[in-house]
Every structure is written in structure tokens, then in C-alpha cells.
Image (cartoon, rainbow, N blue to C red):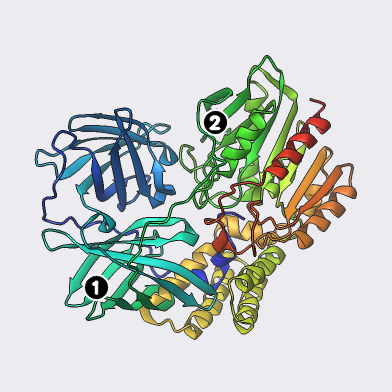
Amino acid sequence: MTGRMLSCLSLAAAMAAAATGQVEFYEESFQYDHDRPAAGTWLGNVESDRVPLTWAALLIKPGDAGGYTATMTLLSAMAVNAPCDDVEIDGRSVALVLPSASARFQGRISDDGQRLAGTITYDLDEHAEGTFEFARTPRAADLPDPFAFSGVLEFSFGKLAMTLVFAETPGGNWVGQVDVPAQGLVGMPLLGVRREGNTITAELGIPVNPATITVELSQDAQRLTGHFKQGPFDLEIDFPRDAEYAEPTFNRPQHPEPPYPYAVREVSIGHPGGHMLAGTLSIPSGAGPFTAVVLITGSGPQERDETIFGHKPFLVIADYLARRDIAVLRCDDRGTAGSTGSFAEATTADFATDVLAAMRFLATVDGIDPGRIGLIGHSEGGMIAPMVAGLTEDVDFMVLLAGTGVRGDELLQLQAELVARAAGADEAVIAANRVQQQRLFEIILAGERDDEVELLLRESMRVQFEAAGLAGEQLDNAVDGQVKQFLSPWMRFFITYDPRPALARVRCPVLALGGTLDLQVYHDQNLPQIEKAVNSGPGDVTIRRYEGLNHLFQPAATGALTEYATIETTFDETVLRDIVQWIHARSGS
């Protein structure tokens, strides 16, 4: 459950509005290097059929060996300070590719050097185009005398460290940024920053769930007090001045860098349903034929590297296996990044057909042994793998990384309790949330007609949100957002789906792995059920637990979700070694 977690089922995720936020440009000219006008920080808006009007941030730097590098933040494409490819800058002409959106940006800088505007083309959907317009906008941390304030937001489900940085531009405008290390956010621009006297207001433009910040600067400018409001939350800000502020950095030592000692191919895979899956195939050096695997992502819209909090676990897994004579195919989920199709309307069963299409493509590739193709699924991907084995007899083996062994409602109820407790939630809050979840699950499991289910959900959620203090439009929006989430095809399928019958039909060898600090798919709830189900049928299962590893298979202290971004290890190497040894032994490679 990497993308859809318990928070989507609790009061913690009530979403107030569906706005994504957009930038209002300042009528101010900023200095820049006239010899390299593209270099600098840009903030603006993008819009297309794929991406409704929303904000984006672009940073362009001169490269050490000539040329330029660029990073972009575009939250609707799951890009946060994401490196851009194919950066081509010639004077005032700018072209670059944002890989997570499979989008090519081409534009030109205005004569006064203050605007960068142009068009967006999506590589796998040539008729889909859009436009962008950025304004040269300095970051708060780069201006003279920025105000940085660091503290902790406290709420019913735990605590969250945060830094707010504000600065005044030479023209008297204000800019701001926020760091939330536990969520992998660094230098995230704040929108609509205003200062009147000592009152500062700003918006954090998170898609679907924007937050507003209203704070007072003390007379001596040494303290910031006020409120952070997001959905049903109204959290107190009381942050002291951070005189030693420096932007946090995240080291990811396991991320491989080219050149690679194996071949890498970009592939497009057609699905019988008409959509296209974009992926990367890593093939070991040598003649082959090689054992191969298809990687299956966890829940939520995931791109091929399963990027989360700056970690790229599928990139690390693919690199490790390809260096050890195992070919790896990893794809963007349908409707995500470079793949076409609709993610929102798909269920877990639909994603299984995507994996089947990927397997069939892989079997046609020169150098791949079609008789030795297996699956490695993480979280929901570990639920999908046995479903695929029910669609074809060609699955030679499967590895389940934090795979599920119980029905969805059971999994999510325990997940909610464990994550909330690790975050420091009060037991009374945990108990109240348990009752709320059980009521909602009972409504879904009852199997009533859609209109009856919606009516019951609305009644139940309205009671919950009114108790949380919501009223008026905010209450209506919160109820609408949660009802839409619960009535989505994916959620209704997941809550009611029991993976055990599919596991019992598996005929190939299975390696099921779990970390003892995985709070999202708890090992003692799921691994015994996986073992029992596979052993009840013709399959062969090996169960392994790893002490101290979390849901991402990182060495953790508590397993809390707030640790994911701050842990340097992307994927424990002991687990990688065990996977490779088991695959070679079981596939006869």
C-alpha cells in the first residue's frame, strides 16, 4: 500500500476542496545573467487536457561541463524537484522533458527576460498538448535576509516537523517556501504570499487538498505564531526563528548512475483494451537467454520506479537484478506518467491484465527465456501477482514483497491502528477511528445498490465530520470528497477482495517477504495467511521475515511513515541478495 494508505479512510484525509492552486505573477522585474537568461528559478502555471490549470516550479542551472541541468516540481505528475531529461537551451529557446509526465516542454524567454512560455507535448499521446507560462521568481531562501522559522505541527494523529521561510523581494513583494522533511518536501514554493503589517498569509498548493497559512511575526521577528489549516485540520503554529537554517538534503546512495553494465531499453506495450504501457527493460550483458521478471507497483498511481519520498525502490531492484543476470521490466501504471488509459476507473483486477500484457511482451524479446518469466509485486502488487497467475500458466515464480493475505477491510483496519499508534495518536482517537472505519466498511460490504450505499455513506460521514468541527461548505466538500473516494471502483474492489482463493490456486514457487516494522501490511497478519493459502493448493511457498525493516524494506526505528523520507537506504541489500539467490535457485538459471 504505497500510494493509498489508511489515511484515505480516516478523518486525517478529509479533503476540503478540489482546487490545485495557481500562481499570480508579480509585476516586478528580477535581475538575471543576460548571457545565460534561462538560468534561474521560475514559478508559473501549466494547463492541458491531462493536467488542469495548476502551478509548477522550474530550476535551471548551468552545468559543470557546459550545458544546463533542470529540475521541476509538478505535483499533478508526482514530480518534486525531479530531474529533467534532454535539456536543450540555445539563448532564449528552452526545451526539456519531464520524465514522470512523459511531457516535452518547449518555449522561449521573453525579451525582458521575465517570462518563459510555450507548449507541452505528451510523447505517448501526440494529440494531447498544453501550454505553460513561468515567471522569473526568486526563492525565499536565495534572497537577502530571509526569515526562517522551524517547529512542529501537532495533531491528533501525531507530529510533523516543518520549516517556513519568507523573504521580501527588492520590489516589495513577498515569497515563501516550506520544508517538511518527513514527506520529502524541500523548498516547496508557497503561493499567494502576502504581508500586511506583521500578518503573513500564504497557500500551500497541494493538489486536491490545499492548505492555508496565516501567521503573525513577533515584534522582534524571532517568533512566528498562527494557524495551518488543511481540510478539517486547524493546527497551531508556534515556531521560533531558525538562525542556523539550511535546506535539508536527502542522500540516496543506492540510486544507480549511468553508464550501466547492462542494456536499457525504453519500451511501449499495447494492451488489448487500447491503452499503452510505457516502461523500461533492463537486459543483462551477454548472450542469454535470461530469466526475467516483471515488477508490479503498489497502490496509487505509480510510475515505473515506484518513486516515494525521493526513493526509487524499483530502480534499485532493477539495477541489482540486471547486474546479476536477471532481466527486469518495469512500467508506469496505466494513466500515469508515460502510460495512457484511465487509472481512476481501474481496479486491482484491471491492473492484473496490464501485468499480463507486460509478461506477454517480455516473452517476445530476444535474449529472454519465455519459460523463465516471473513476477515481483510490492504491497498491492503482491496481491496482483497471484491474480495474474490465474490468468496464465506462464508465471514461473513470484516474489511477494509485503503482499496481502487477508481481505482488504481487515488489512486497512489494522493498518490504521498501527500507523496512528506509531505517530503518537491517543488511544481514544484510535478507538474512535476504528468504530468509524468499521461502520464504513460494513456499508460497502453490505452490497447494497449504488444509490443506497451513497446515501448511507453520506449520512455516516456527515456525522463524523460534524463531530470533527466541520460546517457549511467545508463540511459538504469533505463529505463529497470521501464519498467519491469510497465509491471509486478501486476502493470498493479492494475492501471486498480476499486474496486467499487466488493464492490457493498458484502453482509456481512463491517467496513471500515482510518486515517486522511494516505497519501498512503487518507481517503477522498477512504472512501466515499467505503461507496457509498457498500450502492448501499445489503451490510451494517460502516465508521470510526481516527484523527491523519497514513497508519499503528500509531499516527503521519504529516503522512510522514519517521515517520513510529521512532513511538513506532505499531497499535493504540483504533482501535483494536473498531475492536473487532464490530466483536463480527456483528458475534453474
Q: Residue furthest front?
A: 244
Q: Give how far across and how far down residue 571 sits, in percent.
A: 63, 46
**Which of pointers 1 and 2 indicates the residue nearer the eye?**
1
Q: In the rendered view, does 554 fall on the left or right side of 190?
A: right
Q: Give how far across and how far down residue 507 sits, in percent.
A: 84, 39
Q: Which residue is mark 2?
A: 280
Q: At label 1, which amino acid type do we have?
A: Ile
Q: Residue at x 55, y 66 (%)?
A: 7
Dot 1 surroundings within 10 Å: few (below 14), some, or many (20 or more)? some
The mark nearer the N terminus, 1 or 2, is: 1
Q: Give how far across and how far down residue 410 sits, in percent.
A: 72, 66
Q: Residue at x 59, y 59 (%)?
A: 491
Q: Is residue 329 above or below residue 517?
A: above
Q: Is residue 491 above or below residue 274?
A: below
Q: Which mark is residue 200?
A: 1
Q: Is residue 159 above or below residue 523?
A: below
Q: At label 2, which amino acid type do we have?
A: Thr
Residue 110, image quadrant: top left
